[in-house]
Image (cartoon, grey):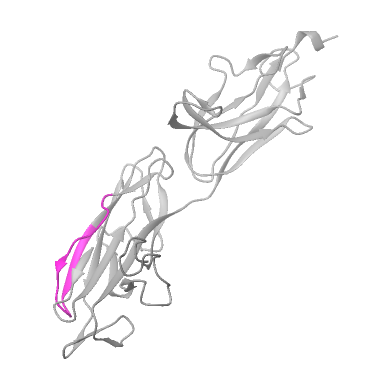
Amino acid sequence: MVLALAVGLVWLQSSMSKVSADSWPILVNIRHLAFGTVFPGEEMEGTFTVTYSDDGDGVNYRIVQQRKPLPEEHPEYPDGGDPNKPGYYRDLCPHLTKTSGEGEGDMEGDAFVGGDGDPVDTWTIYFKAPAIYGQISQNHIGGVISESGEYGCDISIDILYEPASVCGYKFFDTDQDREFYGSDYGLPGWEINLLKETGCTSGESCENGWEIISTEITDEDGYYCHDSLQPGTYRVKEVMQDGWVPTIPTNPEYFEFYLSEAQDKLFDFGNYNEALLD
């Protein structure tokens, strides 16, 4: 958002961060809000939307804001400035009010988007330009400034979610019944990989567009667990060892699934090795 006061030539700027769908399941529709030229004491408004862009039930999020640093290429402050000195934008954030006009009870510190009934949240930002006294502009803490200056406020989105997990056992399926039962026993020391679709095309961790994001080694009981996961679609797959034949899963030799917030899924991997049977 770029705003200019007619008196004092104080430039006001604000940016809206875009949330990437590759890492988070929501998108913000704009990069900047542009109000044009405003005058001291003038009140204006603009809107932005938050869209749920993934499968599942939706997510909780909050709107956060912070004082904006100058860009590194700023001619007066090439290093971006010192946050305690004028090299940083003066703080515009106290002059912004954010409200949700959809009657859903969303607050900027605790909002929800998603599901069939709430795929998009629309937020209105109200801006009140700082007041003036005579020919002097007033800053964000009530003081006065007589020189030109720049204001800024970065607004971004934080996802609030309970972490999910996928766990299970790697076991010797002695009777090949595809169930961990009876004489079956856990197999330690096996790699169980967690993959996420990233569109990767090369590299040791890439498998046809799916990238290994976590590797766990089964413990003495054959147990593995990938935890602290955000909602999303994943695959979990074992690294096969010589002499073993998979009994579960087969064709394909992985599990593909969607994890919702706070969800814990269990997938067991069964293998058979005739040479180890008496």
Q: Main secondary structure of the magenta part?
A: loop
* Residue appearing at x 43%, y 77% in the figure: 84
Reply above or below: 161 against 251: below
Please give left or right for residue 87 compared with residue 275 in the image.
Answer: left
Please give left or right for residue 194 compared with residue 68 in the image.
Answer: right
Where residue 176 appears, as percent x and y from the top left, is: 70, 12
* Picture quadrant where residue 7 is located: bottom left
Reply above or below: 93 against 123: below
Along the line of sight, the residue nearer the viewer: 40 or 175: 40
Reply above or below: 103 against 193: below
What is the tally of numbered marks visible in this picture?
A: 0
Where residue 123 appears, as percent x and y from the top left, is: 27, 59
Where residue 181 appears, as percent x and y from the top left, is: 74, 22
Which portion, as a residue range, is magenta?
A: 29-47
Along the line of sight, the residue nearer the viewer: 145 or 270: 145
Where residue 213 appears, as percent x and y from the top left, is: 55, 36
Along the line of sight, the residue nearer the viewer: 145 or 275: 145
